[in-house]
Each structure stands twice: as C-alpha cells, then as structure tokens.
Image: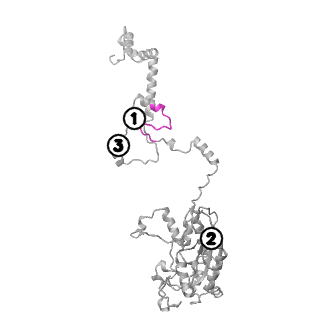
Amino acid sequence: MAHLTWPPINEFAREIMSGMSLHDLPDFCFWTVPFRFLTEHCIICVALIAATCLVLCYYKASPRNHSRDIPTPTTSSLESSSPRILPHLSFNNVLTRLRRRPSEPSNITSLTPSPRAKMGYTRRSRSLKKQIGSLPFPQPPLPLRAKQYYDAFLVLDVEATCQQGTDFNFPNEIIEFPVCLMRWKDRTKDLQATQLEVVAEFRSFVKPTWRPVLSKFCTDLTGITQEQVDAAPPFPSVLASVQDFMVEHGLIDGDTGERLVRFCWCSDGPFDIRDFVVKQCFISKVPMPGWIQGDVLDVRTAILNWLHSREQPKDSSVTKYGPRRRTLNITAQLKVLGLSGFEGRQHSGIDDSRNIARIVAELARRGTSLHPNTVIHPNRRWHWMGRHGQILDDHWTVKNVDDMKPWQKL
C-alpha cells in the first residue's frame, strides 16, 4: 500500500488492515476503502468533484474552428501554420473565464466565434429592428448653397447650315436662334442660391443668304425644313428681336443697350457664340452686339470640372499635359447628373436649349457656382473671310467623312 501517500488515507488504511488476511485483500481494495472514505470524508470528495467540473468546463471552451466559411486547409498551409496554442490552466484563468460576460472580449486567448454568433438575428435584434422601422425616415441633408454672382442666365443653342464632310471651319449660317432665360427663385442677400428656373423663352428661325438652299444632310440633322427658313426673317432682324426680348425682361437698357443686371450666356460648348455668331455677324455685315459679347459659361466644361472635383482621374487618363478629359454631349451630361433622358428632338435648337437649362439648374442645385469659363473673341477671323463680308469659295473644301476626326464632325 505504498502508493497511498495522502495522510488521511494512510491512517484509514492502517486501521482497516489490522487483523485482515490476504484472502480479504481484494474486497478491501475495491469496496471497503472507497465506501468508507466517501462517507467519512464527503467534504473532500465534493471539492474533488467540483474541481473536476471546473477543469472540464474550462477545456470545453478551448479554441475550436467551427466556421463553415473557412475552407479546408491544404497540405502546404498545414506545414506553414503555427502549432495550436492551448490555454494555460490556472485557478485565476478559470475564475476569469467564468466571470467574463459574453459581450466582453477574452484576454486569455483569441477564440474563433461560434456558429451561433454568425447565424441570423437574435430575438433582441429583431425587436430593435421593428422599433427602428416604426421611426420616421430621416430627412436628406440640405443641399450646399454656393454664392451666385450672376442674376440671370441666357441659354443659347443655335442651329446652322452644314454639309456632310465639313467641320467647324465651314462658313455656317444660323438658321435657328433659341434662347431660354433663367432666374433665381431663392437667392438671398448674401448671394446664396440653389433653385434656378426658366422664366421666358425666345425662338426664331433665320433665313440664310449665302447658301439659301438647305442640304438634305442639314434638314435630316436639325429637322428644319426649307419652308421654315424661307419664311423666316434675316439675321439682323432676329438680332433686333432678341434685343427687344432682353429689354422686355429688364436685362439691358432699351436706348443704350447697356446691361442693367449681371447676366451670362450659356451654351453646350463654346461653338455657338465663339464660332456661329461671330461668323454670322461677318456674313450679315453687322457688328456683334455688346450684350452678346464677353465670356460665356461652357456647360460642357462646367460638367467636367464638377466631375473631376468629385473623384480623382485614373492613371490611364493622365498625360504629360495633365488629365485627359473626355467631352460629354447633352445626353451624357443628363445621365451623369442622374436626370431623365433627353426631352424633345436632338439637334433641335429649342429642345437642346431646354435640356441645357435642366443641366444648369441641376448644377446649381448641387452647389456649383455658375460663372463664365470660356473667352470669346468677337474679331476672330477664318481663312475663307474676305473683305466686307465676302466669302472666298476657293478657301474652304469638303473633306471625306472617313478622314475626319470625331471632334471635327458637325
């Protein structure tokens, strides 16, 4: 009985084995000692059982990989992975694990979350979701209010004569002159505003004089018929009508033609005033009015500036001259701003002007400060311009459409 080293058990064994033969030894070893020990030392037995339960509970929470999202490791990953670290058994660790709340992180070892934690909503989360759903929907934030230094905007998109195979160097004549007047609805004393609306429109067809007959390509592109331009007034009369329209709405003085308010001309690209109006004034032998001179707001450039202010250009679009910018037509501008599609007929002057006005109003609503961004030169000249409005026929040619670049095509 040398293996019984605990003092209480040794004394108990000596007392029992006194006067016992070897024949009764098996009964003593398997029945007598455990029964007598358990009855007389119950407190010690209860402590042993409790310690055993604590150890089992501790090792039951040891790290195990229960996640189904983690794939089965391969042989190479097993070889390179570090050996599994078992938690250190100590009385303090046992008490810490038992006292730790479920929401508190464990500082003993990093445990992989059990499948129950990755499953669906709990009962408490479902009740919170119902409470959140019953709350009123939060209002969207107010739009940015930028300072607007111009009182009115005149949207212009003219249509001109053209032939297939010509570019912007062709001596075009204006055949439609539409204008959309836009004013602020909520402009404050400190010049902040976001709501811009169309308050008046002007439209007139123009009769060409150098090439009075329209080409089929021009009619199919613009939708303007020969009868409409034949019955229209010439360009000087249209300019006078536009001036009366501006006087009527308090933009310029009727006698001197000076500006009474700060207004800005807007167009899709710089072509309408920079090219078409300057050419037509030369062909019609009239000076360019002062109320149409000055810098204009190129809406296409304003859209590109707004896009590049929101996101950085990609590396593939950066050249040694700076970021490469892809021009957007009216339909693409509407799509970029999240507006509905083009309303009306494309390449119709009045419909183009109305859609450009929608783009300008949306830029203002998004907090963009609207101001001129393109310089206009009223005295610009082309190689086909002679003296006193004369057009040199041998100084302009019709190119092959296949040989033209995309930006050269009308």
Give the residue furthest to the top: 19
Residue beneath the point at 46% across and 81% down: 404
- Foreground pick, 79 / 317: 317
Q: In which quarter of the image is residue 268?
A: bottom right
Q: What stretch is highlighted in magenta?
A: 96-112
C-beta proximity under 8 Å, tags 1 and 2: no
Determine whether 350 is above or below 213 in the image: above
Q: Can residue 344 be seen in this view?
A: no
What is the spatial separation of the Cα atoms under label 1 and label 3, in whole angstroms?
A: 15 Å
Work out which quarter of the rendered image holds the N terminus and state it: top left
Who comes first in sequence, dot 1 or dot 2? 1
- Lateral position of residue 240 relative to residue 12, left or right: right
The numbered disc on residue 87 is 1
- Residue under label 3: 82
- Foreground pick, 157 / 282: 282
Who comes first in sequence, dot 3 or dot 2? 3
Local secondary structure at mark 1: loop
Task: Choose mark 1 or mark 2, whichever is in front.
Answer: 2
Q: Position of residue 275 (x, y in %)?
A: 52, 81
